[in-house]
Image: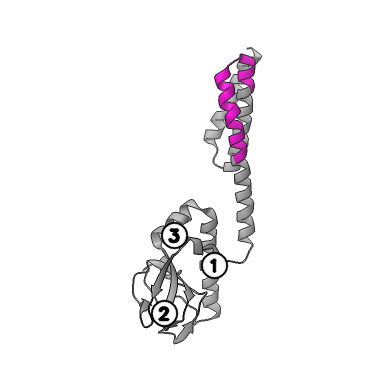
């Protein structure tokens, strides 16, 4: 068996392995190896289309590998960092709620997570006011019955930012960073509820 033929089989085997692998970073590394092998195969066999194809795929695989490594590093950093609610704000839409109106009522279906951007709101069942910077409704959206546990009334003209359930699920599936932030947000609120019974679990 000639060296060129062996090189072709090895390169094909590397491509097969990439389809079998499940982890992204090892897959990209093996993909780079297969690109190099096929490019070498094309050089020795004077196969210009193969050289062009894998000559273009090599830098693309290298770019995706760097992106995967950066994402893994970023997620690791986020997992050990404090939750920052500002990470959610770009995905939310603004709503204005007039003084005296209810943001949500106990027993309502939880369809949104809210962020109070300005104004004061009142948790009726708990008899407490909340100010800007508070999240409302993140636990209820993921509760088994998906029902609000508290009634929230606006004491001032309020500006709230809302993110709908469907958008949350889309971002959770498409954006690992958002998914991690969402998990950290809910866990933080659960711990807050344990330490402070009057926590905002509306």
Decide which of 95, 114 is in the foreground and name it.
95
> Which numbered disc flags the more N-terminal residue, 1 or 3?
1
- Determine whether 150 is above or below 181 in the image: below
* Residue interval drawn in magenta: 40-63
Q: Is residue 37 magenta?
A: no
Task: Say what secondary structure mark 3 lies in.
Answer: helix
Residue 200 visible in this rendered orientation of the protein:
yes
Q: CA distance from mark 3 to mark 2?
A: 26 Å
Task: Say what secondary structure mark 1 lies in.
Answer: helix
- Residue at image point 37% right, 78% down: 98
Q: Which mark is residue 168?
A: 3
Q: Is 23 left, or right, of 114 in this rendering?
A: right
- Determine whether 115 is above or below 168 in the image: below
Query: Which residue is situated farthest in the bottom direction here?
Result: 127
- Residue at image point 51% right, 67% down: 186
x and y percent of residue 173 in the render?
46, 52
Q: Residues within 10 Å of mark 2 (few under 14, many from 20)?
A: some
Q: Which mark is residue 157?
A: 2
Q: Which residue is mark 1?
A: 85
- Determine whether 157 is above or below 19 in the image: below
Contact check, label 1 and label 3, Cβ < 8 Å: no
Q: Residues within 10 Å of mark 3 (few under 14, many from 20)?
A: many
């Amino acid at each position: 068996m000639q060296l060129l033929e062996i090189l072709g089989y090895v390169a094909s085997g590397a491509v097969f392995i990439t389809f079998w692998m499940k982890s992204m970073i090892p897959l990209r590394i093996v993909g780079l190896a297969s690109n190099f092998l096929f490019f070498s195969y094309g050089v020795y066999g004077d196969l210009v289309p193969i050289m062009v194809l894998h000559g273009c795929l090599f830098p693309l695989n290298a770019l995706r590998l760097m992106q995967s490594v950066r994402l893994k590093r970023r997620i690791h950093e986020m997992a050990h960092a404090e939750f920052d609610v500002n990470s959610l704000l770009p995905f939310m839409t603004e709503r204005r709620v007039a003084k005296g109106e209810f943001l949500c009522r106990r027993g309502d279906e939880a369809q949104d997570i809210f962020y109070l951007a300005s104004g004061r709101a009142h948790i009726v069942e708990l008899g407490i006011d909340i100010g800007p910077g508070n999240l409302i409704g993140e636990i209820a959206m993921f509760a088994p019955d998906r029902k609000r546990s508290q009634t929230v009334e606006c004491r001032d003209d309020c500006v709230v930012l809302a993110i709908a359930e469907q958008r949350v699920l889309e971002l959770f599936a498409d954006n690992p960073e958002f998914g991690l932030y969402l998990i950290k947000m809910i866990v933080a609120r659960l711990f807050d509820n344990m330490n402070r019974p009057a926590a905002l679990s509306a």
